Image (tube, coloured by chain):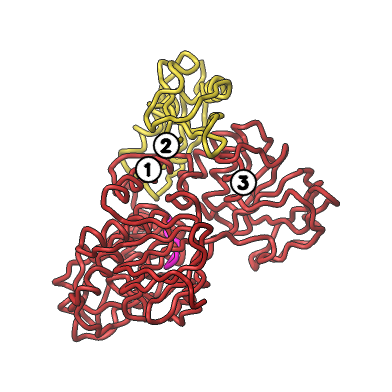
């Protein structure tokens, strides 16, 4: 590929969704000159243009926007800031020295030498084949995001009578959307004893439209030759195993899967970036810098955040970090680990160099279990760095904990930070 | 008229209190299950005059995609959602269109306009 076009950039952002757009604009504002977004779709925005429902941007914009509105806002910021966008451009490879190999129909093969890289590829949906649902392989089995694209962008309905497996947010949103478009939604089946999506979506998408939610249920067989003809659903026990005798046949022509999202890290893994097995994304620090200096990551490629606002925040930090990196303004790393202690399932970032303060410094956490009147504590040895009471926590609702840089610097000598969640003794049953 | 007993989940915070309430003559006369003072306000609104912002799509001609996303510019009564969806489903627009542009006035007689939520050309 000796004749491929060579381009130079200060900061190359891989992916033009909300994380990538925020990173590019932030890098430009922080003084990076040649900032480039590489986006495989024909337009910027990532998944937002098909998320036509509202509720985006309540933190960042202080109003409830729809996905397309949130995307348009950032698209105009990108356009005004002088960021260059290469659309219809697929990145195939990134080297450790930040040379990017990409292709597009206009230029063919492209090589881009960039001084810093921000990974912003987002996430993808889990499919039937990752769940190993037995049965035939008829048409009519979709992921919720694919249905969302068909209905909201391309103008097709997926079928006439749908069963939804999994109660992730996109599944709940699509249950309502299909119902409004005249598709019969037989029910939502969730293997866990609690919904996976936000309570707001359970209430406004299912309760509002009398769509039943079957907890501790799953699909145990898909039937149909050419097209889905129905599914067998079964109740499951505490170990999520189908209970014999509980099965029931449900007639439908469409199965919609909303069974989880996976950070999209094929590129990151090829470069040899260190990954976190819990989040499925790269290990990052306070500037969203990965284990390879000069390669940053933000948004859902790092961890599946529940809110686009959080994706935007991490994008802004990664973009600023990348600009500082190329200007030699990022002090050397001397990281301590940030560990998820009792009661906490995951924490991002997973490491921090206390002297490289970033403001505001936020930890994003997910609770292990639902609880009320709990206390979240960030400790460094015996020293308490941050502490917050929460009236209620739920695993689907991510918690953002802001820590003052001064407090963080105090921790510099104490070793790893430990995040814990515990019951606030005695107050559990008090009602105010 | 005797009171109607019902329950609903408060969505104002992650506590998600399940409110048990009795409604009589269009008023909430009894309420339990709330853990804070926002519970009664939420219950009152949801039982007496629930409203929603409705988002959907309309057919668009001459654009690179087939559907234009739209929303009601304000909240409409929850009971009017299906009428509004039917009304909005009848319209067709032509590109180019700007975000915020009104595509349908006074949807289903609610007094609320329907606007485009993206630029499309």
Query: Subunit of mark 2?
Result: B
Label placed on residue B98: none
Chain coloured yellow in the rendered structure: B
Contact between labelled residues 2 and 3, with CB atoms less than 8 Å apart: no
Q: CA distance from mark 3 to mark 2?
A: 20 Å
Residue drawn at 54 percent across, 39 percent down: B65
From the image, tell me which residue sits under label 2.
B118
In the displayed structure, would residue A289 be above or below residue B47? below
Task: Please state which of residues A115 and A390 is positioned toward the viewer in this rendering.
Answer: A115
Q: In front: mark 3 or mark 2?
A: 2
Q: CA distance from mark 2 to mark 1?
A: 7 Å
How crowded is the residue under tag 3: few (<14 C-alpha within 10 Å), some, or many (20+)?
Answer: many
From the image, tell me which residue sits under label 3.
A147
From the image, tell me which residue sits under label 1.
A72
Q: Is residue A183 left or right of residue A46?
A: right
Residue interval drawn in magenta: A301-306
């Amino acid at each position: 590929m000796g004749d491929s076009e060579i381009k130079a950039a200060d900061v190359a952002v891989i992916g033009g969704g909300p994380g990538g757009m925020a990173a590019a604009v932030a890098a430009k504002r922080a003084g990076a000159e040649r900032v480039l977004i590489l986006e495989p779709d024909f337009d910027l925005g990532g998944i937002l243009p098909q998320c036509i429902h509202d509720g985006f941007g309540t933190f960042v914009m202080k109003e409830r926007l729809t996905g397309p509105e949130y995307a348009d806002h950032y698209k105009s910021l990108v356009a005004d800031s002088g960021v260059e966008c290469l659309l219809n451009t697929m990145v195939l490879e990134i080297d450790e020295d930040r040379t990017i190999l990409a292709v597009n129909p206009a230029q063919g093969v492209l090589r881009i030498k960039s001084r810093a890289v921000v990974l912003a590829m987002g996430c993808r949906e889990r499919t039937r084949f990752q769940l190993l649902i037995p049965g035939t392989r008829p048409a009519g089995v979709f992921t919720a995001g694919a249905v969302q694209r068909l209905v909201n962008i391309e103008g097709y309905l997926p079928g006439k009578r749908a069963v939804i497996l999994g109660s992730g947010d996109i599944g709940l949103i699509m249950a309502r959307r299909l119902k409004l478009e005249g598709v019969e939604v037989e029910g939502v089946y969730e293997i866990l004893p609690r919904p996976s999506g936000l309570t707001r979506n359970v209430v406004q998408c299912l309760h509002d439209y009398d769509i039943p939610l079957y907890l501790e249920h799953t699909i145990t067989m898909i039937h149909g030759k050419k097209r889905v003809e129905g599914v067998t659903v079964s109740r499951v026990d505490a170990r999520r195993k189908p209970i014999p005798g509980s099965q029931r046949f449900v007639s439908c022509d469409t199965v919609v899967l909303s069974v989880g999202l996976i950070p999209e890290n094929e590129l990151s893994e090829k470069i040899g970036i260190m990954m976190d097995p819990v989040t499925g994304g790269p290990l990052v620090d306070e500037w969203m810098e990965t284990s390879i200096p000069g390669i940053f990551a933000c948004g859902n490629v790092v961890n599946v955040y529940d809110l686009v606002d959080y994706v935007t925040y991490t994008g802004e930090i990664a973009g600023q970090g990348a600009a500082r990196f190329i200007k030699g303004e990022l002090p050397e790393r001397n990281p301590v680990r940030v560990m998820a202690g009792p009661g906490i399932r995951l924490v991002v970032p997973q490491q921090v160099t206390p002297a490289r303060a970033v403001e505001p410094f936020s930890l994003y956490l997910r609770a292990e279990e639902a609880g009320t009147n709990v206390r979240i504590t960030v400790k460094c040895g015996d020293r308490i760095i941050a502490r917050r009471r929460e009236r209620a926590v739920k695993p689907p609702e991510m918690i953002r904990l802001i820590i003052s840089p001064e407090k963080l610097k105090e921790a510099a000598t104490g070793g790893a930070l430990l995040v814990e969640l515990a019951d606030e003794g005695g107050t559990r049953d008090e009602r105010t | 008229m005797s009171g109607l007993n019902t329950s609903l989940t408060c969505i104002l915070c992650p506590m998600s209190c399940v409110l048990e309430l009795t409604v009589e003559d269009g008023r909430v006369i009894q309420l339990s299950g709330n853990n804070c003072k926002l519970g009664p306000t939420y219950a009152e609104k949801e039982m007496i005059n629930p409203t929603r912002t409705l988002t959907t799509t309309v057919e668009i001609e001459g654009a690179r995609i087939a559907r234009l996303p739209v929303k009601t510019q304000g909240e409409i009564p929850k009971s009017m959602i299906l009428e509004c969806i039917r009304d909005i489903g009848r319209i067709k627009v032509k590109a180019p269109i700007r975000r915020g542009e009104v595509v349908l006035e006074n949807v289903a007689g609610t007094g609320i306009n329907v606007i485009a939520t993206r630029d499309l050309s």
